[in-house]
Each structure stands twice: as structure tokens, then as C-alpha cells.
Image (spheres, rainbow, N blue to C red):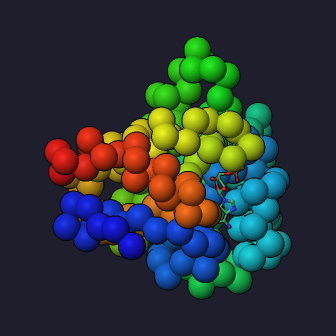
Amino acid sequence: MEQFLSDRLTVSTGDITSMDVDAIVNAANSSLYGGGGVDGAIHRAGGPSILEECRDIRSHRYPDGLPPGKAVITKAGDMSCDYVIHTVGPIWHGGKTDEREVLADAYRNSLKLASETGIKTVAFPAISTGIYGFPKKLAAVIAFETIQEHLRRNSLPRQVKLVFFSESDLECFNQAVDKSRMSV
Ligand code: ADP
């Protein structure tokens, strides 16, 4: 496991559903009704109560779905963490539709919500880099810089864990953030 900003940002591989943290972030889709990838894994591990809360959020706050870049929070059902922060990353369309800014918003708004909720430790998957097709190295730099910026300005969350699903994705991150790391 690698550490940045003292120990406030850590990077590792693993399954996000079994992280020892207060909250995990879900790379959801706008429907909030579950899906494939990490979204499916979180709903399977957490059980039906998460979907019930998501339906409630849809009917009361987001009848047309959660827009990309925004974030909402639910409890975590059967998982050991307390909360799931659901955010929607951008679908990659070649970089012509503000995908970079929307991805930064997804990280920024998830961190803001974590901070407002009093969450001390939070784990993120590599949002948008699966089914949504965002280039992994570019996503790594955006994730790293956006998280860094939040941590510099806020005391909560105290620690952020970036969790990659494979060694090759972790390697991709390490290559991509080499320069940014030097400025930490
Ligand atoms: P998106 O639709 O935002 O691209 P995906 O779930 O398809 O979301 O993928 C996002 C990232 O999450 C990918 O890098 C994928 O390999 C990773 N991933 C999938 N399942 C898990 C899991 N259980 N824990 C951590 N990361 C996961």
C-alpha cells in the first residue's frame, strides 16, 4: 500500500465492499437502481435496503435520475461500513463533452458529502474506468489531484483510500501520477 499526504491518501488493490472504512463510494448510474461492475457488487454485498433507499431518493429528490457529477448517500445495509456514497461518473465520449470536469465533480461532491456527514474514512473505486470507458491514466490523475485538493482544504475525511480492482490498474495509477506525486 502506498501513502500520500502523510497517511491521508492511500492507494491499494482490493474489493471495495470489504474495506475497513466508514463509507465506500459507488460508481453508480443515473437510475440508482444498481447495475454491473462495482455497482452490482455493492448492492449484492449490502442487500436490498440500499436499493430501497435509492428508490426513495429517486422519488423525492431526483425523479429524472442522479445527474453525472452529483452524489447522494445511503446506509450500507449488510456491509461492515456505515454508508455508501453513490455518485455518477461521466461516460467517455472522446473527451469532447466535459468528461474531465464531470469526473472531478464526482470526486469533489462525494468528498463534500462525506465531510458534511462527519465521515472519517472513505474508499473510492476508479470511477468511470470500467463500463463507462474513461481512460485509466487520465482518470487516475484527475482522482489524485481532486482528492489532494479537498484534503488540503478540509480536515474530513481524515483518510481517503483509492481502491483498484487489479494490479495492472494500480500500476496504471502509479505511472500516471508520478509527476503529481513529486509536488505533494
Ligand atoms: P463505471 O460504469 O463508472 O465505469 P464500473 O463498475 O464498470 O463503473 O468500473 C469502475 C471501476 O471499478 C473499474 O476499474 C472496475 O474494475 C472497478 N471495480 C469493479 N468491481 C469492483 C470492486 N468490487 N471493488 C473495487 N473496484 C471494482
Q: State the image coordinates of residue 66 (x, y, percent, origin top left).
A: 67, 40
Q: State the image coordinates of residue 158 (x, y, percent, origin top left).
A: 29, 68
Rendered view: 173 above or below 158: above
Ligand 1 visible in quadrant:
bottom right
Q: Residue furthest top?
A: 96
Asked if residue 90 shows in the view, the reply is yes
Give the total of numbered labels. 0
Q: State the image coordinates of residue 9 (x, y, percent, origin top left).
A: 32, 63
Left or right, residue 105 beside residue 73: left
The residue drawn where x is 40% and y is 47% is 175
Left or right, residue 114 beside residue 94: left
The residue drawn where x is 57% and y is 20% is 95
Rendered view: 123 above or below 36: below
Rendered view: 44 above or below 103: below
- What is the quadrant of the N terminus in the image? bottom left
Q: State the image coordinates of residue 105 (x, y, percent, origin top left).
A: 47, 37
**89 vs 170, nearest the viewer:** 170
Asked if residue 62 shows in the view, the reply is no
The residue drawn where x is 73% and y is 75% is 46
Left or right, residue 118 beside residue 110: left
**175 vs 150, nearest the viewer:** 175
**138 vs 69, nearest the viewer:** 138
**31 vs 97, nearest the viewer:** 97
Q: Quadrant of residue 176?
A: top left
Left or right, residue 170 beside residue 7: right
